[in-house]
Image: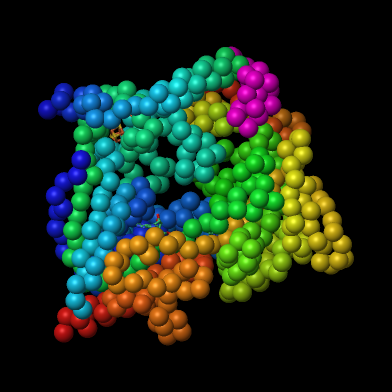
Amino acid sequence: MQDQKSQTFKAKREQHEVSQQLKDELKKFNATKKKVVEAFGEGELNIPELAEKTGLSREEALYYAMTFLKFGWLKTTRLDDMDEYYYYKISK
Amino acid sequence: MTTQPEKLNFDVLIIGGGIAGIEAAINIANNGFKVILAEKDLTIGGKMLLLSKVFPTLDCSACITTPKISEADRHPNITIFTNTEITSIEKQDATYFKANLVKHTRFVEEEDCTGCQLCEEACPVVVPDQYQYGMVGRKAAYIPFNIASPRVATIDIDNCILCGACEKACPTHCINFMQADKNYRLIVKSVIVATGFKLFDATKIQRYQYGTAKNIINAMQMERLLAPTRPYNHVIRPGDGRVPDKIAYVLCTGSRDFTVGNPICSQICCMYSLKQAQLLMGALPMADVTIYYISIRSFGKGFEEFYEQAKSMGINFVKGKIGNITEKENGNLILRYEDVASGRLKESEHDLVVLSVGVVPNEDASSLFGDAEWKQDAFHFPLQKDLLFNPSLSNINGIFMAGTTTGPMDIPDAILSAGAASMEAIQYIQKTAL
Ligand SMILES: Cc1cc2nc3c(=O)[nH]c(=O)nc-3n(C[C@H](O)[C@H](O)[C@H](O)COP(=O)(O)OP(=O)(O)OC[C@H]3O[C@@H](n4cnc5c(N)ncnc54)[C@H](O)[C@@H]3O)c2cc1C
Ligand code: SF4
Ligand code: SF4
């Protein structure tokens, strides 16, 4: 019963088609995640710096950084001396 | 795939699990009647659960909502259905109504889910989080937020790629992609509509640039930025993550405005803006906060004092209606307005603009009642048959209304109105039983 239940996603695939658009969006997200992780490396960045290193707009850079912060993949390190931007780094 | 409807009997059906619906449910249940509370969202609590602090007491909103929620949740006379849609309600005779409900599937066996979030961790799909107004992402397998009730996971099937990672990760094996929607047929003696309000959609005022300029948000988004379960951990601009230091509030956005079809005052926007401005002064002590207003309506007990307190904290008040807003290259905003004090057209620059959006009716209930026509007033709120003496009476006998369903009001008034609706429903049941 347990085994049967933990395979229900397979049965669902028979009834429910996953669109190409969803698959493409996932690819895009994974590519962006890789870019963001590489941009941080071992160091810390604020949002404009992250945007510049990744080629994302500042708005997108913030969306990704804050999503990663929520998932615990990033952490806040400090506020800059001008009290303008927070810095973030990879947490795991 | 749908199933044959299961038949259930209750004394009262309450539609909408915001603070008004919850309060009405507790009142009725405490009087010994059986209640079903049907909520369309994944969690009960309504908008109050998403607020930061509440005027005029500045209590933490989540802290005062959650005890009410758990009281309703644990009450032996209350059954709560979330993720549920009411498809029709028919009045049978003076003593009962038949209602059809669909409890949509979460693809999760609710009673077995421990809320451990391991499914969420395993899920690879990220989409904008509707509970944070799109400011951050969430997974396709998700719990809306930590204080959601019930705190159980849901699979967002429209965004799911059916990879199975959540199902494999779930320690209680409660994810079930074969779970179907469930239909119910209810027999109830009375109904309370507590479907609440909708926020005015600020994209309708194009000259304010909401949705196009990056650093213009609405007041509900600011509530989220200030709330303990906030998306950014700090108050920063959504356009670039900078800490704002010159914030503007535009009052009456979508209220008292014939051009957008909402001529009435929303009653709460002045006060919630005063509250947010005070909270911002606490969060960002160096920031300038300016409130652009037509007239400040601080009419409740302690409200004028709350306004005075805001002034004494250094919040600026400018009497003037904003004509338009333009975005500069650096993301700052230029507000053009008529300054009533000098009679001159002026411009001022801010780095974050908050639109104090108004309350508009939720017209969901109008499609539910079949032949028994559900009447509306001139502003598209449900008709209050006896506005002065019995404000919770709808135009259909046995159907009552609670909270912001009938018009703009704050939390204390929504609670009072829920009290009135629950007493009317109890009296109606007792009278019709004779
Ligand atoms: C930005 C902002 C700040 C505010 N700050 C304050 C404050 O500080 N102090 C204060 O007193 N008030 C404040 N308010 C007002 C407060 O939010 C409302 O008074 C309160 O939420 C009203 O509760 P309600 O239950 O009537 O409606 P809602 O909170 O709207 O709840 C309605 C519920 O019904 C559900 N529903 C809707 N349609 C259906 C349907 N068809 N079927 C089933 N369920 C349905 C909804 O999902 C929701 O859960 C604020 C409002 C805003 C917008
Ligand atoms: S099956 Fe769907 S919800 Fe589950 S982990 Fe995969 S994408 Fe996420
Ligand atoms: S569905 Fe399973 S993994 Fe997800 S929160 Fe519930 S118990 Fe945990």
Residue at the extreme front of the image, as rendered? B371
In the image shown, does B153 or B206 lie closer to the viewer? B206
Considering only vertical position in the picture, is B393 above or below A19? Answer: below
> Which residue occupies 28% across, 57% down?
B87
Could you tell me if residue A83 is visible in this image? no
- Assess whether residue B114 is covered by the magenta stretch: no
The mark total stands at 0
Screen quadrant of the N terminus of chain B: top left
Q: Position of residue B259 (x, y in %)?
A: 64, 63
In the image shown, does B423 or B432 lie closer to the viewer? B432
Could you tell me if residue B333 is visible in this image? yes
Residue at the extreme left of the image, as rendered? A1
Q: Position of residue A48 (x, y in %)?
A: 69, 26
What colouring style does the render use?
Answer: rainbow
The span shown in magenta is A41-61
- Assess whether residue A49 is covered by the magenta stretch: yes
Screen quadrant of the C terminus of chain B: bottom left
From the viewer's perspective, tell me whether residue B42 is left or right of residue A31: left
From the viewer's perspective, tell me whether residue A30 is left or right of residue A9: right
> Which residue occupies 61% across, 64% down?
B255
Q: Position of residue B346 (x, y in %)?
A: 84, 56
From the viewer's perspective, tell me whether residue B314 is left or right of residue B87: right
Residue B117 found in image quarter: top left
Q: Position of residue A76 (x, y in %)?
A: 59, 29
Considering only vertical position in the picture, is B268 above or below B51? Answer: below
> Which residue occupies 19% across, 61% down?
B186
> Which residue occupies 68% across, 68% down?
B296
In the image shown, does B150 or B101 lie closer to the viewer? B101
